Amino acid sequence: MAYNNILSKTEDGITTITINRPSKLNALNKETIQELHEGFKAADADANTKVIIVTGSGEKAFVAGADISEFANFSVENGGKLAAKGQELLFDFIENLQTPVIAAVNGFALGGGLELAMASHFRVASDNAKMGLPEVSLGVIPGYGGTQRLPQLVGKGRAMEMVMTAGMIDAETAKNYGLVNHVTTQEELLPLAKKIASKIMRNSTVAIGKAIKAINANYKDGEDGFKEEIKQFGACFGTEDFKEGTTAFLEKRKADFPGK
Ligand code: COA
């Protein structure tokens, strides 16, 4: 599929999706959100894709936020719809994917950019990365899940301060906060993300998908994470991956998982 605002490349089991609007610091306009939806959906459906990495093009930005020029004249109704549609197409969509998504944060991750990184399953960052939710400086609040996922990741007090000050934190602070798992140089960022991806790929993609569901259940209203874990644990016993994983262990050989 041809895209105008993203690049998607699959190699050795890893699909790298790059947001490609460097002249606008990869800001998320409507078309980019739709293309990201299509790109993630296609990668998730592709049996060859075991892990997805999302990053930004250029050396300056991961994503500098939602495209401000698109919503500057919105009404109350349009504002609500913008948030709802974005969450459905991209942010909730990514969080609930069964294929692991790693955000490689290569520069500014602001507003919708940080929200995109937070909707990913975990994050690595380059040492020039700057992260923040500057929405209140524009008279609006984070609308793509930021008020929910930031406190989940860094704790309520830190999230309150970041949202209220609209300030940016650097990569080391983000690591201390638990917002990103690893920090490295810009050159090493994608190699590091791919190294982690290759460790993930040795394991059962089917079991990983079920683990994602169980972990996510803890953060969803009305869902009982422990119950979901029992359900997903039980379901593993009906999979080919489980048969292969346990048989390989007992036969003292490396598992060759059939996968999704
Ligand atoms: N929406 C739309 N356009 C954006 C954008 C956004 N969120 N972020 C950056 N851009 C555009 C700029 O308008 C500029 O376009 P132009 O060259 O056509 O004027 C281009 O990207 C480069 O940005 P610029 O501001 O010139 O770069 P800078 O190095 O001086 O500053 C930032 C970098 C990230 C500090 C600054 O761009 C910024 O504050 N962006 C908005 C961040 C934000 O509030 N995001 C939350 C949105 S809800």
Image: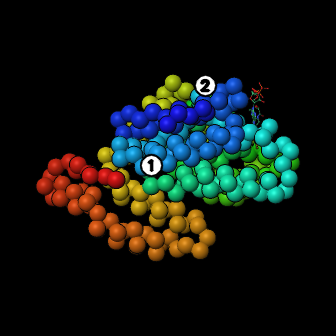
Pick whichever, 182 or 225, lies toward us: 225
Q: Which residue is mark 1?
A: 44
* Residue lying at 52% horizontally and 57% vertically, measured from the top left: 96
* Image mark for residue 248: none
20 lies above or below 219: above
Question: Which amino acid does the dot numbered 1 rest on?
Answer: Asp
Determine the secondary structure under disc 2: loop
* Image mark for residue 58: 2
Return the x and y of residue 117 as percentages of the image width and height: 60, 45
Q: Is 152 positioned to the left or the right of 192 in the image?
A: right
48 lies above or below 230: above
Q: Quadrant of residue 92?
A: bottom right
Determine the secondary structure under disc 1: helix
Please indicate, yes or no, whether residue 169 appears anywhere in the rendered image. no
Pick whichever, 250 or 1, lies toward us: 1
Q: Is 92 positioned to the left or the right of 256 in the image?
A: right
